[in-house]
Image (tube, rainbow, N blue to C red):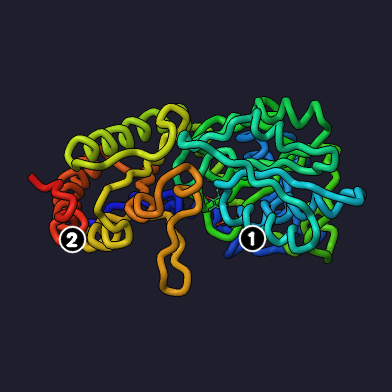
Amino acid sequence: MRRIYFDNNATTAVAPEVVEAMRPYWTEHFGNASSIHWFGQQARAAVETAREQVARLLNARPNEMAFTSGGTESDNAAIFGVVEASRRDTKHVVTTAIEHHAVLHTCQALEKRGVRVTYVRVGSSGVVDPADIERALRPDTVLVTVMHANNELGTVHPLEEIARITRARGVVFHTDAVQSVGKIPVDVDRLGVDLLSLSAHKLHGPKGVGALYVRKGTLLKPLMYGGHHERDRRPGTENVAGIVGLGKAAEIAQARMAEEGERVAALRDRLEAGVLRSVPLSSVTGDRAHRVPTTTNISFDYVEGEAFVIALDLRGIACSTGAACSSGAVEPSHVLTAVGRTPAQARSSVRFSLSRFNTAEEVDYALEIIPVVAEQLRSVSPHYKAAGTRS
Ligand SMILES: *Cc1c(COP(=O)(O)O)cnc(C)c1O
């Protein structure tokens, strides 16, 4: 069967050039990057080249980049790291209600340790108001953590404005940029962030590797203890092949961003407009003007999102609800409910996330399938019939 992949916010295909770049570091160049002999030097050189490639994508200095096991670890290292490094008697953290679980659950763990956390609310735009962040600040606020692009909606938060506020107050500012890096320009100096998390597998690199940008002078206590790797920020023998893959993925993303960003945005817009036109009672969640090019989140009234995803999968189209399945019960997405969707609307939402590997032909094929499947599911929905919405 023909397979179409519209779930790129969950993970992306590893680019063929990335696989090729990684291959030698599993075979002849297998050395430990800390070893002083030739084998070690090959590995060390590759890690440092990758550090430059990732730093260049972010307009950062290479010595401000620490490699990690992925976005989740980078978020944990930044949030715990800043809080643990602070010597204040009372500590307060500001975040938003629509963060990824790698940030939200980390903040909840901090609360269990006595740290106070404010979860700033976000309106139906899916974009946080910097004034709300400012109002949440307290004299003991040690960290503000606000994601760059939201993984469920694609909406982009105004980090520059938030950074002006945190700087004026001397508060450390972290962003989870896992969904923006490689898709839109991310310049750590222009954004004004002190810490930034990214993950290779969201930008056509391998799984299990990521990076944390740490602005010079930012105090951070490490999560783990061991060797002196990554300037004492992250011990453990480097995942050399993975790091090489991240570096190559960053280089490619930078080279193609402008052109591919426009092309992918046009595909996403074509898919979105086509769905809205052909499926009655469908609507987009979040501000369509402030989004990454890849993502659309569409709510289909009277369609159960999980059932829709499964029915589309049976027709070869992969997408996602963004809802977390816990103990068999489908919980409505915390993001969708936070931006004002009712639990029913949240359960009726489907996220389509594209990448540079998608084509216009795939979008057109999907546009033939989606309205048919939506109508099939609605035709068996008692609520749909009861609402008398069928003509
Ligand atoms: C995927 C994702 C993460 C987690 O990254 P991993 O590398 O999978 O641990 C964190 N934040 C956001 C916004 C994500 O989309």
- Extreme residue toward the bottom, this view: 327
On screen, residue 218 versus residue 242, left or right, reads: right
Task: Identify which residue, 312 or 233, lies in the foreground.
Answer: 312
Asked if residue 280 is positioned above or below residue 29 in the image, the reply reads above
What residue lies at 11% left-to-right and 48% top-to-bottom? 390
- Position of residue 22 measured from the top left corner of the image (x, y, whole percent): 55, 55
User: In the shown orientation, is residue 391 left or right of residue 230?
Assistant: left
**Label 1: which secondary element:** loop
Q: Distance of mark 1 from mark 2, alpha carbons?
A: 62 Å
Q: What residue sits right under mark 1 in the picture?
A: 29
**Secondary structure category for the residue under label 2:** helix
Q: x%, y% of residue 306?
A: 32, 61
- Which amino acid, mark 2? Pro
Which x, y percent locates residue 209?
A: 61, 56
Q: Which mark is residue 382?
A: 2
Q: Residue at 50% of width from left, 46% of height from top? A: 338
Residue 87 percent coordinates (x, y): 92, 50
Q: Which circle marks residue 98 in the picture? A: none
**Residue 218 appears in the picture as rendered:** yes
